[in-house]
Image (spheres, grey):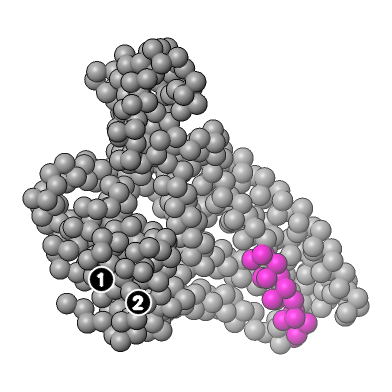
Amino acid sequence: MAERKAGTMSLDPEELAGRHPAEVAELLHRLPEREAVSLLRELYKVRAAADSLEEMDPDEAADLLEELPEDEATMIISRMEPDDAVDVLEEFPRAEVDEILRHLEAMDRTKARTLRELLKYPPDTAGGLMSPEYVALPAHITAQEAIERLRRVAEEAETVYYVYVVDEAERLLGVLSLRDLVFARPDTPIREIMRPEVVTLSPEMSADEVARAFDKYGYLAFPVVDKRGKLLGIVTMDDILDTVILRDTEDMYKMVNVPREERVDTPWYESLRMRLPWLYINLATAFLAASVVGAFEGVIAKVSALAIFMPVIAGQGGNAGMQTVTIVTRGIALGEVPPGKGFQILAKEVLLGLLNGLAVGVVVGAVAFAWKHNPYLGLVAFLAMVGNMVVAGLVGASIPLGLRALGLDPALASSVLLTTFTDTLGFFFLLGLGYLFRGVL
């Protein structure tokens, strides 16, 4: 049993149970793990633990639950909404999930069966995001009967923004808005007032496709149906919003090579363990760029002015490349880059690199000429800038497109890969051209 420090003794579980679960979740996140576990056990006693864990990141919630006795952890999971419970269970090792579900079957066989069904779907699909708690009514009942049923079942549903109309085999026939239901004549069969044109999701749809559906149609929830049209569950706006925020955060972290598990309050030794490997990789790529500089040491010794322009050429290439990486990665995430469009995007970014290189290269060349009064130095700086900007466009588009083609996250380590090319080739262009023009520099 985790021993609670004195700092948490002043926290009254009864008082916390009256707060919004998001506030309690934030408190659990800020506390040291031992104190958070102790507080969670107190919240469990007042039946407030499940709501609070639903508001936490699934990995954090799983870490806390793993520190509890198995019976308490299982009871908390049984009280969570099925979709939230599945998100947390996904963070456990498979053997522990099976053990928890076996204990849950003794408490609530229906809930255990529901969770097993949801766990069949990958977490980043509509099936993994959906909730099985929705309101579905048979098509033959009247509006009055529908309202009476809603009063009985609405409290158990995920949302009652929409009422789904199904046949005897649970196949989706249409959707019923509460407004239409309220204003309909009491004896009207709901089949006559439902809307048969329903936008549905398949359980295999990716989270990105689900997010685009919400963005396109503006609905608050979508039904998920199988190939036979059977209603399986619903995905609500808050479900996909949590997923999108998490994925955006992960992409941001990956682009700068920071693990998503790290937080501002992560212990320094854990942060060191997670960051240091990538710093070693960055160091290796830096030595690669340095080796290019070393190969032209004689040129730099003769024309020291070239050293002044090295960070300018490399830096501009890196900045331009990151613009391209960001735009292409975002386009892939939004579904704007279907297979076959990659070469078109590649051509566009190379053209932009050339045009940007010409525009920026003229300025850099003019500065070099005005500084040393040597037109050849200006020409070298101009050509190096153009060359590196073209490389930045080419590589900046190729990295996310190539990673996607390999089945990897387009944002993965993009900054390391990009700067390796722009630094190394930027130095090579500048110093290589300096070597060719060494007689007139």
Q: Residue at x 49, y 75 (%)?
A: 282
- Numbered label attached to residue 11: 2
Q: Nearer the viewer, residue 386 or 57?
A: 57
What's the CA distance linking mark 1 and mark 2? 10 Å
Q: Is residue 400 magenta?
A: no
Report helix, strand or loop for mark 2. Answer: loop
The crowding category of the residue bearing disc 1, from other C-alpha atoms within 10 Å (few below 14, some 14 to 19, many at least 20), is: some
Q: Quadrant of residue 65?
A: bottom left
Q: Residue at x 66, y 65 (%)?
A: 319
Disc 2 marks a residue whose amino acid type is: Leu
Report helix, strand or loop for mark 1. Answer: helix
Specify which label sits upstream in the sequence, 1 or 2: 2
Disc 1 marks a residue whose amino acid type is: Glu
The image position of residue 307, as x and y in percent, is: 72, 81
Q: Is 220 positioned to the left or the right of 124 in the image?
A: right
The image position of residue 179, as x and y in percent, is: 50, 26
Which quarter of the image is occupied by the N terminus? bottom left
Decide if residue 8 is in sight here: yes
Q: Nearer the viewer, residue 404 or 350?
A: 404
In the rendered image, which residue does mark 1 sit on? 42
Asked if disc 1 and disc 2 are in contact, CB closer than 8 Å, the reply is yes
Secondary structure mostly seen in magenta is helix
The stretch of residues the image draws in magenta is 302-319
